[in-house]
Image (cartoon, rainbow, N blue to C red):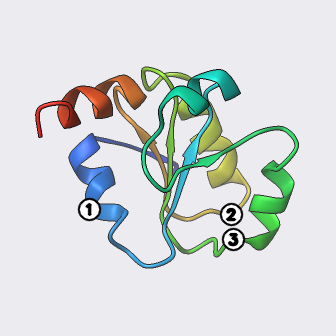
Amino acid sequence: MSYKCISVAQAEELLKIEGSVLLDIRDLASFSIGNIAGAIHLTNENIEQIIESSDKSKPFIIYCYHGNSSKGVADYFFRRGFENSCSVDGGYQEWAGQHSNR
């Protein structure tokens, strides 16, 4: 068992669970230009605080630009004890594309 790769639709469902956490691992400039509502910008400076203060049984949904880099971070969180660590396939680009027509 390890982290999961999930679709944007699956991420949206997991975000409905109380206590779920949405992490954006893109650079600060990209995060500042646009991000998914409620996302926390994950940095080297705040990662340990997030790990220590979060409920490891809740969904951890991680996204990057295209869904590649987030896999490594999702694996890292899984190895740190997060039972429901997920990487969003297609990343922010996929999310934005699916939400631009709504």
Q: In which quarter of the image is residue 89?
A: top left
Q: Disc 2 residue type? A: Gly
Q: How far apart are marks 1 and 3 (CA)?
A: 19 Å
Question: Label 2 to label 3, Cα distance in Å?
Answer: 11 Å
Looking at the image, is 60 positioned above or below residue 47? below
Q: Earlier in the sequence, mark 1 or mark 3?
A: 1
Q: The C terminus lies in which quarter of the figure?
A: top left
Mark 2: few, some, or many residues within 10 Å (few <14, many ≥20)? some
SS at circle 3: loop
Q: What residue type is labelled 3?
A: Ser
Q: Could you say where residue 71 lies in the image, as x and y percent from the top left?
A: 53, 33
Identify the element where label 2 is drawn. Answer: loop
Indicate which disc, 2 or 1, sits on the residue closer to the N terminus: 1
In this view of the protein, can residue 1 be seen by the observer? no
Vertical comparison of 6 with 17: above or below = above
In this picture, residue 27 sits left or right of residue 49: left
Q: Residue at the location (69% across, 52% down)?
A: 79
| Mark 1 burial class by Cα count in 10 Å: few <14, some 14-19, many 20+ | few
Per the image, the residue denoted by label 1 is: 13
**Pointer 3 residue:** 54
Return the residue at label 2.
81
The residue under label 1 is which amino acid type? Glu
Q: For the residues carrying marks 2 and 3, which lies nearer the camera in this image?
A: 3
- CB atoms of marks 1 and 3 within 8 Å: no
- Asked if the residues shown at circle 2 and circle 3 are in contact, with their CB atoms under 8 angstroms apart, the answer is no
Report if residue 44 is visible in the image: yes
Determine whether, in the image, residue 17 is placed left or right of residue 61: left
Q: Which of marks 2 and 1 is in front?
A: 1
